[in-house]
Amino acid sequence: MMQWFHRMASPAWFYRFSGKLIPFLILTFTPLLIIGLYGGLVTAPSDYQQGDAFRIIYVHVPAAWMSLFIYIVMAVYAVITLIWRIKLAEILLISSAPVGVGFTILALATGSLWGKPMWGTWWSWDARLTSELLLLFLYLGVIGLYRAIEEKRTASRFVSILVLVGTVNIPIIHYSVEWWNTLHQGSTITLTEKPSMHIDMLIPLLMMAIAFKVFYGISLLIQARAELVEREFNSRWVRELVEENSDG
Amino acid sequence: MADFFQMGGYALYVWSAYALAFVVLLINWLGPYFKHKKKLKNASDFYLLNREQEHDTSA
């Protein structure tokens, strides 16, 4: 078991494995996205209160979920980095940050585009919006801190600590709509209760959510491969990889 | 069809949101893709240069 774990964590093995995995992820992502978009934009009925403006939900909610999900995954890598010092965990941690920034910006911006016609304002300093903005700054802080420290193993340890400190913000974002009075509506979908949403509206939302999750996998793996080649510049496997490519 | 593009009068908001999603996904796909290519090229240049230098010193 431990042997298997170590092999999986070896950079050379991961590089080859991820190279084979990416095409499958793309093959999963594309149909999910197309069906999700078609369902969300065409077949889902208009909302009785919000009309067609509610269709923003199909990018807004999956993006917001991903902004939290990626941060939690990063926190797991941070724990692995701090306790076991596995290099691959460091790579996966830092490679998650850019796509995390992307989804957080997307959640904030689409929220703004939804807020304007529905609430009459682009932005409000209430609990949900403010804590989500703080999440964006946490992601940016992670990238900035990692870049600022020359020695990447040291950088990864500091970044891990920052990520773990920042996790207090995650439950704040999640529960903000219950703890404070906010413009933002409460959760429509929870794990414990039946969703208060029509099934034709719900299915495209779940499709988009899975599509975004698979997209995170694609972006993460490509980024991690780039990061690996850079960090393992002097290792034998990168040398062999390069020679294989130049000879063949 | 025109109805579809008008989005019940919310076209600007709805289509902007989807366009933005497209841009964000594209950046997070192509960014890492080109970074990976560049890093491979760097490594390849480095090793090819080393190989030439090895030849030079042995000659």
Image (cartoon, rainbow, N blue to C red):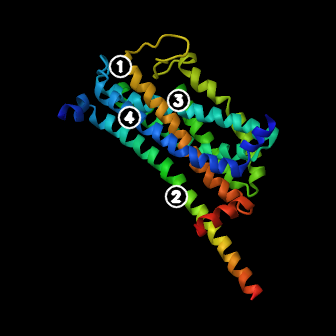
Question: Residue shown at 40%/43% (left/top)?
Answer: B22
Instruction: Quote the CA–CA distance across marks 1 and 2.
Output: 39 Å
> Looking at the image, is mark 4 or mark 3 earlier in the sequence?
3
Q: Determine the chain carrying the residue at label 2.
A: B
Q: Amino acid at mark 2?
A: Phe
Say few, some or many: other residues with alpha carbon within 10 Å of mark 1 (under 14 / 14 to 19 / 20 or more).
Answer: few
Q: Chain of mark 1?
A: A
Q: Are marks 1 and 2 in contact (CB under 8 Å)?
A: no
Quadrant in the picture for residue B54: bottom right
SS at mark 2 in the image? helix
- Which amino acid is tagged 4? Leu
Residue B14: give x, y in percent of width and height.
Answer: 33, 34
State how far apart marks 3 and 2 are (Cα). 27 Å
Callout 3 touching callout 2 (CB < 8 Å): no
Residue type (three-letter) at the residue carrying disc 1:
Asp
Q: Looking at the image, can residue A98 be seen?
A: no
Q: Quadrant of residue B39?
A: bottom right
Residue pointed to by mark 1: A200
Q: CA distance from mark 1 to mark 3?
A: 20 Å
Q: Which residue is mark 2?
A: B34
In the displayed orientation, state which residue is furthest to the bottom: B59
Residue A165: where, in percent of width, then height?
A: 72, 34
Q: Identity of the amino acid at label 3?
A: Trp
Please tell me the numbered disc located at residue A113. 4
- Whether callout 4 and callout 3 share a subunit is answered yes
According to the picture, the residue beneath numbered tag 3 turns out to be: A65
Left/right placement of residue A28 relative to residue A79 reads left
